[in-house]
Amino acid sequence: MDPDFSVIIPTFGRPRELVEAIASALGQREVSVEVLVVDDSSEGSAEVVVRGFQDPRVIYLKNPTPTGGFPSIVRNIGWPLARGRFIHFLDDDDIVVEGHYAAAIAVFAADPSIGLVFGRIEPFAQRPSEQLELERQYFGEAARKAALSRRFGSRLAFVGRMLFGNALLVCSSSVIRRKCVETIGGFDPSIRLMEDADFHVRAMRACGARFLERTAIRYRIGSPSLMHSPNPTAEQRKSELLGRRQMQASYRRRYGSMEFYALALFARTILLFF
């Protein structure tokens, strides 16, 4: 019998964190789960971690051509092999909050028209209190904007905020119907940074989304944060700008300039008051 959820975990050299991520997925109650670990390291170091679980639900996959940190490519190795009705792309250093899958599947059951469910993000790490507080404020504001976007429906307000503002979510905080992943073709392998924002924009536009007013994951923050460092390097700024431009250009090609610029106006006027 196929599982409810297929959890795709790309990993690169973080065995301790990987153990926690896998355990948090396997520990979800009231649902059935399989975990596909996609190892992007040349030495295949994650195989020892997978064997240590001695659980047939945990499957080891080796990237035959390691990318050195190109998550869109690594995730695309995993999802075509998934058997679950729902897919969770979980980063190898994040932790699924207990009950998240059961809560998400209830939302999907209540509204078969939507393809994506995402929840709140709880940052954690052994970092200076100032950095942790900055992360909490960032994700708290993201949750507030996501909750307000619901009054505009399941698609365009979410899409507008993602295209022209800060991200509402990270990859680990969403669960998506497998059919929706198939519809949008997975991740864009040409985008190295902000590939998850592009993926979610396309999923929201094609399949619709719901924001779940509960914590979905515990998000392990780095130093500095790759998403929103207060003092990003010039190279990071350049990579972020490139990723955003790629995402916006892709959307404009797919849905036309009229919708693209109408969304830009909507995001920069009406959504600013919400």
Image (cartoon, helix red, strand yellow):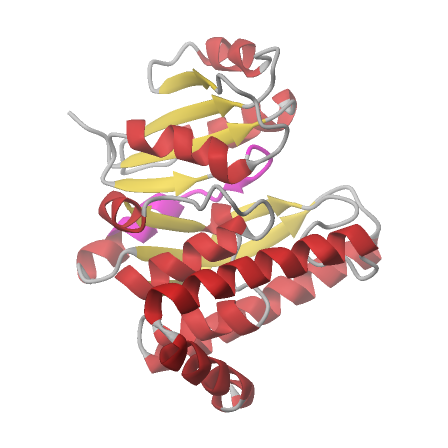
Residue 121: x and y in percent read 55, 55
Q: Residue at x 47, y 51 (%)?
A: 173
Q: Which residue is drawn at 67% across and 47% down?
A: 124
Picture quadrant of residue 263? bottom left
Q: Is residue 97 magenta?
A: yes
Left or right relative to 81: residue 251: right
Please tell me how many numbered marks the rendered image carries: 0
Q: Residue at x 54, y 37 (%)?
A: 71
Residue 117: x and y in percent read 35, 57
Q: Which of 227 and 128 is in front in this view?
A: 227
Residue 254: x and y in percent read 35, 64
Residue 222: x and y in percent read 73, 43
Left or right relative to 12: residue 63: left
Magenta region, residue range: 92-105
Q: Quadrant of the N terminus?
A: top left
Q: Which of 254 and 232 is in front in this view?
A: 254
In the image, is residue 270 above or below residue 144? Answer: below
Please say whether residue 28 is visible from this viewpoint.
yes
Left or right relative to 171: residue 69: right
Please say whether residue 213 is visible from this viewpoint.
no
In the image, is residue 175 above or below residue 110? Answer: above
Q: Nearer the viewer, residue 200 or 84?
A: 200
In the image, is residue 249 above or below residue 36? Answer: below
Q: Is residue 183 magenta?
A: no
